Image (cartoon, helix red, strand yellow):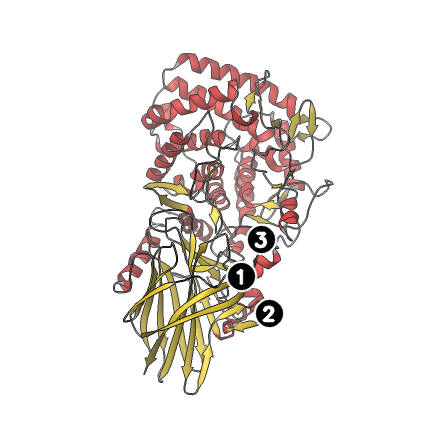
């Protein structure tokens, strides 16, 4: 994945392409391939402090100045608040992602190569430089540091930073913050007390957010080279890390290589997705978790359960999958799993579907591992408790109706994944009986019937079986729209929302059959004709009144389009799985599945490099938007590629061995 000067050296083109590094703790570094920071979330070191808490920006950038003879080349790229630009990107001749983000600058006949990597498990970023020159030249590097929540900006340049200089190393201690250590293998550090004013973040400006920020400059390194050389700078909350930077670099290269050790295919999309999956798997407080997306999301229960099969089971990371299932089982409260686990504070439980997706994650884990004893002893009691609470009623109006279907929520609430809300305006009100919630409910009951049978638990088995039969009978009668030949999205007190949305595809893609073959074909046809795009499914059909073709503008406009036509990449997984099931997994359907997924290989080069975006515009050219690196987008694409294109579907051996 390489880009030449026509892309990396173009402000407009380079701003569209973002790189990301992660440290396995939820920390990250990211920016654009021009070197400019276009989001408040861009920076070289963004991490929680070692003692835990919310993620903070600690180092924004390193600004390099290369002097050759009497001429100085400024390599920094920035947009400033007065609409001026610093155009160091014009010296870029190449940006590449292998093995890590690497910038190559040319100034006359001198090349400066800058490679970035993070130390796995640490709040540490290493910047590795190589100067290729046959002439004497000088290099000056300024670090731009900060200490603020990664969701905020610092526009008050008056913080009383403390500094301690020791040779090439400077320790910066912001008020009430963690000590940041900046060290270099070469050069002499000279002290400053200066500020870089009014760095402007283009994306934030477009989104109507605060977009101007000031960064503290504690000083600079000066270096002189007679004929080139190599050196490194470490940015860390764990003290200086430059002494063994070569060893750390090699360890990170080997770790990335090992991520592909289980991958048996040479298909480039599959291999890239396997590597992308690792970004989202973290360890926090001694337990693994899944970050929903970078740069701004935390751990979300729904996203975790949808993502777990693709990120951890397809990739062979069974131990982490097991620990995550056990962790969320411990978080269960009144039948609910957390909607979000924030960096600080208590979990939030405002979701109806996280618990139901938990059943699907457990089933997938069993299918891949056959680890029945763990499920029976630690998870099965929690699953029973979820069913019990959904039957009798739990928080947020979640309860089983007399017909066996689940109803949830009330006016002003948003409990499903279509959860955009602006003030008191719930953009997509979905209270009542929701189509995918009841498809998940049926699949949970059917799975529990089997699990209870394997656990020699006859009374619950009988109950779950009877409930599953009741739901199977009532689901089509409740949701089927005879005049439209597809499923209603929501039913509330007999009123149907018959707008065409993609949620009904889950009634086809989930393991256990709910509809007749004719109905399945009609749903697939409606979704394929009106919602399918090369990068996912539209969240609303274009012919509907509330359809929005573009996701852009301020927060109100964006949230108003979020689930009103915007394309969601993660839905391509259920769509492909449904397509293959409806067509009886024929050879022709496998070829079509491959065609459906193939555009995503090109998408790897478009936005969040080597990853899959959260959303795209509803209309051509389907510009990628939202979160550039999204867990369930990567996970569902990888899962469906493995299972539906490569036909690597796990067998449910746990059932066979216990019959």
Would you name the residue on which mark 3 appears?
624
Marks 2 and 1 sit apart, C-alpha to C-alpha, by: 15 Å
Report if residue 651 is visible in the image.
Answer: no
Marks 2 & 1, CB-CB < 8 Å contact: no
Residue extending farthest bottom:
70
Figure quadrant of residue 230: bottom left
3 sits to left or right of 84: left
Residue 331 vertical position relative to residue 86 in the rendered view, above or below:
above
Report if residue 478 is visible in the image.
Answer: yes
SS state under label 1: loop
Figure quadrant of residue 203: bottom right
Name the residue located 32 percent from the left edge and 25 percent from the top edge: 373
370 sits to left or right of 80: left
Tell me if mark 3 has few (under 14), some (14-19) or many (20+) residues whose alpha carbon lies within 10 angstroms of its own.
many
How many numbered marks does the figure carry? Answer: 3
- Image quadrant holding the C terminus, namely top left
For marks 3 and 1, the one nearer the N-term is: 1
SS state under label 3: strand
Residue 279 vertical position relative to residue 241 in the rendered view, above or below:
above
Residue 225 image point, x, y percent: 33, 80
Tell me if mark 1 has few (under 14), some (14-19) or many (20+) residues whose alpha carbon lies within 10 angstroms of its own.
many
Would you name the residue on which mark 1 appears?
38
The nearer-to-camera label among 2 and 3 is: 2
Camera-side residue: 467 or 299? 299
Would you name the residue on which mark 2 appears?
82
SS state under label 2: loop
């Amino acid at each position: 994945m390489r880009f030449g000067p026509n892309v990396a050296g173009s402000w407009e083109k380079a701003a569209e392409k973002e790189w990301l590094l992660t440290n396995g703790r939820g920390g990250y570094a990211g920016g654009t391939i021009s070197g400019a920071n276009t989001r408040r979330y861009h920076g070289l070191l963004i991490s929680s402090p070692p003692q835990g808490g919310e993620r903070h920006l600690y180092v924004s950038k390193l600004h390099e100045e290369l002097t050759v003879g009497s001429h100085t080349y400024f390599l920094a790229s920035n947009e400033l608040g007065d609409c001026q630009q610093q155009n160091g990107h014009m010296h870029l001749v190449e940006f590449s992602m292998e093995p890590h983000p690497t910038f190559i600058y040319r100034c006359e006949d001198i090349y400066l190569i800058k490679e970035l990597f993070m130390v796995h498990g640490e709040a540490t970023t290493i910047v590795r430089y190589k100067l290729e020159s046959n002439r004497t030249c000088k290099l000056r590097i300024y670090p731009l540091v900060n200490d603020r929540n990664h969701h905020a900006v610092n526009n008050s340049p008056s913080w009383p930073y403390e500094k301690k200089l020791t040779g090439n190393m400077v320790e910066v201690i912001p008020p009430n913050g963690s000590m940041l250590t900046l060290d270099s293998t070469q050069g002499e550090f000279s002290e400053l007390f200066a500020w870089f004013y009014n760095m402007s973040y283009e994306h934030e400006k477009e989104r109507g957010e605060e977009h101007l920020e000031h960064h503290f400059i504690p000083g600079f390194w000066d270096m002189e080279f007679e004929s080139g050389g190599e050196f490194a700078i470490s940015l860390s909350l764990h003290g200086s890390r430059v002494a063994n930077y070569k060893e750390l670099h090699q360890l990170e290269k080997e770790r990335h290589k090992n991520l592909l050790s289980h991958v048996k295919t040479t298909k480039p999309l599959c291999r890239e997705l396997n590597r992308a999956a690792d970004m989202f798997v973290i360890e926090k407080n001694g337990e693994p978790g899944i970050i929903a997306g970078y740069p701004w999301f935390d751990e979300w229960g729904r996203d975790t359960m949808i993502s777990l099969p693709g990120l951890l089971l397809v990739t062979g990371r069974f131990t982490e999958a097991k620990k995550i299932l056990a962790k969320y089982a411990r978080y269960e409260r009144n039948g609910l799993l957390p909607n979000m686990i924030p960096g600080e504070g208590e979990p939030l439980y405002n979701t109806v579907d996280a618990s139901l997706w938990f059943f699907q994650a457990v089933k997938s884990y069993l299918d891949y591992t056959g680890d029945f004893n763990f499920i029976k002893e630690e998870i099965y009691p929690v699953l029973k408790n979820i069913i019990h609470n959904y039957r009798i009623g739990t928080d947020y109006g979640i309860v089983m109706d007399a017909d066996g279907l689940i109803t949830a929520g009330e006016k002003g609430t948003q409990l499903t994944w279509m959860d955009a809300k602006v003030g008191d305006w719930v953009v997509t009100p979905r209270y009542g009986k929701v189509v995918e919630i009841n498809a998940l409910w049926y699949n949970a009951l059917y799975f529990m019937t089997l699990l209870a049978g394997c656990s020699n638990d006859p009374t619950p088995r009988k109950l779950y079986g009877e409930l599953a039969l009741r739901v199977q009978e009532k689901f089509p009668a409740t949701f089927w729209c005879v005049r439209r030949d597809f499923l209603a999205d929501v039913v509330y007190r007999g009123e149907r929302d018959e707008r065409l949305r993609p949620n009904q595809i889950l009634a086809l893609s989930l393991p256990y059959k709910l509809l007749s073959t004719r109905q399945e074909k009609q749903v697939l046809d409606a979704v394929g004709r009106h919602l399918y795009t090369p990068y996912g499914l539209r969240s609303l059909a274009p012919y509907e009144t509330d359809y929005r073709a573009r996701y852009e503008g301020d927060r109100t406009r964006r949230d108003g389009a979020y689930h009103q036509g915007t394309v969601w990449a993660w839905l391509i997984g259920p769509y492909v799985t449904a397509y293959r099931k409806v067509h009886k997994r024929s050879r022709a359907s496998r070829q079509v599945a491959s065609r459906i997924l193939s555009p995503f290989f090109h998408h790897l080069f478009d936005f969040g490099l080597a990853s899959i975006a959260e959303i795209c515009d509803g209309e051509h050219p389907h510009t990628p938007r939202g979160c550039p690196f999204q867990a369930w987008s990567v996970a569902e694409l990888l899962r469906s590629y493995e299972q539906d294109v490569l036909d690597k579907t796990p067998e449910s051996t746990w059932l066979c061995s216990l019959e």
